[in-house]
Every structure is written in C-alpha cells, then in structure tokens.
Amino acid sequence: MDTVDICICTFRRDSVVAAIRSAAAQALPEGHALRIIVADNDEAPSALSRVRAVETPVPVHYIHAPARNISVARNACLDAARDGWIAFLDDDETAPPDWIARLLACAEAQGADAVFGPARAIYPASAPDWIRLNDFHSNLPQRRGGVVETGHSCNVLFRLAGTPAAAFRFDPALGRSGGEDTDFFFRLHRAGLTLAICDKAEVTEEVSPHRLKLSWLAERRMAEGQHYATSAGKARPVLLATALAKAALCTAAALPHATNRPRLAYWGLRAAFHLGVVRGVVKPAKRDAYGS
C-alpha cells in the first residue's frame, strides 16, 4: 500500500479549512492510502483549532513548526511524511477530487519522480481587465528546451521511496524571501530525478485584492528572476548576458503598446523578470515576502 501524504503549510489563514477538506476528498487509485499533514508556521499554534474543527475520515497530522520561515514548515512535512509519495498544496488553494489521481497517472505514464500541475487563479469581480486578460496570477509549470528543470510547490507530487528526494530539504535561507521551492526542485533535477508536468491536474486559488496591483506584480516578477538566477546553477556571465538581452528585447516589444495596457503590462513584466535575473547574478535576493 503506497501512502500519499498531502502537505499543507499554513500561516494565519482561515482558508486552510477549505484546503484540508479538498485534500480529504481525493479519490485515490486502488493500492494508495491518503494522509494529510498540516504544518503551522506561526509562532503560536494558531491553526490548531481550525485543523481540529475539520471533520474528515482521512487522518490529519498537525505539526507546529514555528519560525515564520516556509522552509521550516516544508521540512517539517518532509520529516513527518512516510516513505511513499508526497504532495504539496497551498493553504489558500483547493483541489478537485481527481487531483492526486491525475498526478499519479502522469507520473506512471511519463516515468517521472515528480509531477507539477497548474495552479489557476480565480479573480474577484474587482480585478482589472489587464490583469484578467493576461492571467498574471496563475502559476503554470514551465518547460525550457522541452525539459522540466524545476517547479513550484503550490501543486506538486513527488516520490520519496527509492529516490534521493528523501535526503533533500528546503533551504531555510530562502524561507522568508521565497524561491525555496524553485531551488529545491532544481537540486532534485540535478540529482537525476525526472520532473514532468500534468496540465490536467489543476488546483485553484482565489486572488487577494492586495495582489491586484502593478507594483505587487512587478516586485514579484523581479523576485522570481532573482531566485531563478541564484538557483539555476548556470554560468553567471552567460546568464547575465542572456538576461540583459532578453530584458532589452522585452522593453523594445513593450514600447509600441504604450496605449494598450494589457500588452504593455505583459511585456513590461517579462522585462521585470529578466532584470530580476540580472540583479540575482549581481547580488542574491534578500526579500522578506513570506505571508504575502
């Protein structure tokens, strides 16, 4: 019997209740058992009452992992997981009942050790059209040159049993700035694990109003570029030259769209990512974004 541990790291969010309920509703293939691990990253065990209030037939293992450092919470989940499969779901996300089954099927079909799925944004009615049209807040796993080199922990399933993943941990130095998951999966890829994408294994996340601003998106894209630069393991001169060229191209592409806000934002934020790569090559990211 293979165990699938669905891990939810939480920090002062009521939405963790809906996340737990959706995790508990997973319909797993025969031969798989489900367990839920909730790691509370608050200094006080503030999520304990929320977790205990959820009635579910699936075992829910609560861990108090204080530090306001998401890497600490993720590592507590890894320490508590059994030697099977482990999945991560954010505490503001929900998953359909076939989420894990789809990820498992993709892993088997592609011979993958880790599988990433999309995290689709659900926008409030107040969301500006230029954000909604570009769908800036959805998190879609990427292939570079046809290869999946890394991914995000908002929707992932990976194997612990019989792989080097059991010995890996998230870097606490990145636990407040973000990018700890990108770094973690880059290292798994370099260790020889096969990473894949399952486009049909979607989860959803409601977008908070404070994230519906160009300033928030630009800062996020810059940070993503910095994290990519520090985690990719590529030659710094090559990375710097490539990022500068791409930033210039994106800026040039944005100029003809000065009066078309959706296209201007699209190219402008792509430029921000590549400028973040430049900054990451010059100076590693130091950003306290946990909880945003």
Image (cartoon, grey):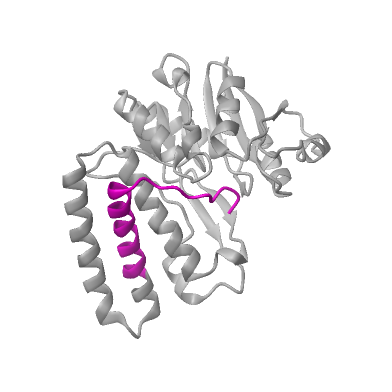
Q: In which quarter of the image is the C terminus?
A: bottom right
Please give left or right for residue 49 compared with residue 230 in the image: right
Q: In this view, does 288 lie above or below 50?
A: below
On the image, the x and y values in percent for residue 190 come to 30, 28
On the image, the x and y values in percent for residue 224 come to 39, 51
Examine the structure image and report whether residue 279 is included in the region drawn in magenta.
yes
Q: In this view, does 15 lie above or below 66?
A: below
Going by the picture, which residue comes out furthest to the bottom?
Answer: 259
Examine the structure image and report whether residue 201 is included in the region drawn in magenta.
no
Q: Is the magenta stretch mostly helix, strand or loop?
A: helix
On the image, the x and y values in percent for residue 124 come to 61, 68
Please give left or right for residue 80 compared with residue 143 in the image: right
Q: Nearer the viewer, residue 272 or 131?
A: 272
On the image, the x and y values in percent for residue 206 come to 61, 58
- Residue 39 falls in which quadrant of the image? top right
Image point 69% across, 44% down: which residue? 16
Image point 65% across, 29% down: which residue? 37
**Over which residues does the magenta segment extend?**
266-292
- Residue 278 falls in which quadrant of the image? bottom left
Image point 67% across, 34% down: which residue? 66
Q: Nearer the viewer, residue 141 or 237?
A: 237
Disc count in the image? Answer: 0
Q: Nearer the viewer, residue 282 or 49?
A: 282
Q: Quadrant of the N terminus?
A: top right
Q: In this view, does 55 lie above or below 200?
A: above
